Image: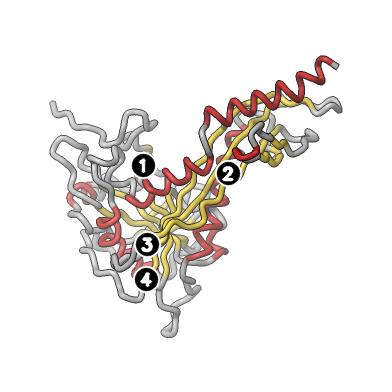
Amino acid sequence: MRIRLDPWPVDIEGGQLSLQPFGGELIDIETPRWAAIPARSIPERLTQVLVVDGKRRMESRVFLEDGEGGAGMGGFGAYVVGAVNLCPHGTRQAELLDVRAQRVLAHAPGLRVNPTELSPRDPHTGQLLYVPVPTESADPLAPLQRLQSLMLDAEQELSHAYASAVPADETDDEEPLTALTLQDGTLRRGGANLGGAVVGYVKTMQTQYLSADRVGLLSSLKPGERTPILHMKSETGRSTRFTWYVRLSEAAFYQHPMSGVMRLEMYAPPEPDFLPRSVRQVANLSGTLLTRLGSRAHKDPRAPQNLIPTAALEQAMNRSMGSSDLVTRRIRAHIAATFGREAVA
């Protein structure tokens, strides 16, 4: 018998080892030879890499009555997205960009809900404005799902705002790749229409995309090496991506051999006619870039997949949302002061 550790903390649901089989379609698009591809240098023309992430927080679940006979579940929630701008060559300090926070009052559909403004006793502590947004159903979990969807949409919008344009076809005069965006998680559907060199990096692998005769390559990859690029089509056929795997660091002898492996993806056309030059360029530099950005175990329990800029960005986003305990107390005080008077009247 042999026992090896799942590299991720025990409070991460599913960890890294609970892989579900993939029911879609994978096609060799770069090469039919399934072997490791070495890391390449980062071109000088790539001067800007942005790492984009988001966080959401449900602050209080509520039951709403709109005064016109409508009632349903809702929730006060907040989400924030942000970006870190860094130089891939290390010639300047990283810069925190666009930490955008938003508060919403997600509510069951069909209710008439007004914006809710929480004014503190001390004006210096700022006001909290919750904008009403309807959910798609009356399910009790719908407010949390709506909050998650809003956060992902905001992430996608921010990711595409900074990235270099990606040409729709192969041309000799295509624009050089000068800016690249790394977006935490899988890419959102429909984002291909926004353009831009955006790479989704999936650090918690929950699906086994590779067949049994190919998955062994992931364990043998050396730091910086990658697999060939594949064209991936979902089970429904509505989602298509270019995807490949990169190893950020060696797995310790006591860890699962896929520790330190990350899956990357970029938007792809529905039919795999060709591999765009820009996608190959991004894949070639991805190993070198990500080994530089990978975190270390003594600083981050989610190392190396939780990138160093992501960890710094998470701290800024937490500050932007404020203390969860203080916000919850203000929500309770607002409800007591506003609706307690109505009950007395």
Q: Is residue 23 visible?
A: no
Crowding at dot 2, Cα within 10 Å, few <14 / some 14-19 / many 20+, comes out as: some
Residue 264: which numbered mark, if any? none
- Rendered residue at 79%/20% (across/down): 341
Instruction: Name the residue beneath numbered marker 3.
Output: 86
Depicted 92 relative to depicted 214: above or below? below
Q: Residue furthest bottom?
A: 173
Which residue is denoted by mark 2 in the rendering? Answer: 149
Residue 40, above or below 9? below
Quadrant occupied by the C terminus = top right
For residue 289, what is the image quadrant? bottom left
Per the image, label 1 sits on a secondary structure element best described as loop
The x and y percentages for residue 34 are: 24, 59
Give the CA separation, mark 3 to mark 2. Answer: 27 Å
Q: Describe residue 341's horizontal placement relative to residue 155 as left or right.
A: right
Callout 4, which amino acid? Thr
Label 4: element kind: loop
Q: CA distance from mark 1 to mark 2?
A: 19 Å
Q: Is residue 145 left or right of residue 341?
A: left
Q: Which sits earlier in the primary sequence, circle 4 or circle 2?
A: 4
Q: What label sits on residue 204 in the rendered view?
A: 1
Q: Is residue 55 above or below residue 6?
A: below
The local secondary structure at tag 2 comes to: helix
Residue at point 44% right, 65% down? 272
Please say if 263 is above or below 14.
below
Q: Which residue is mark 4?
A: 47
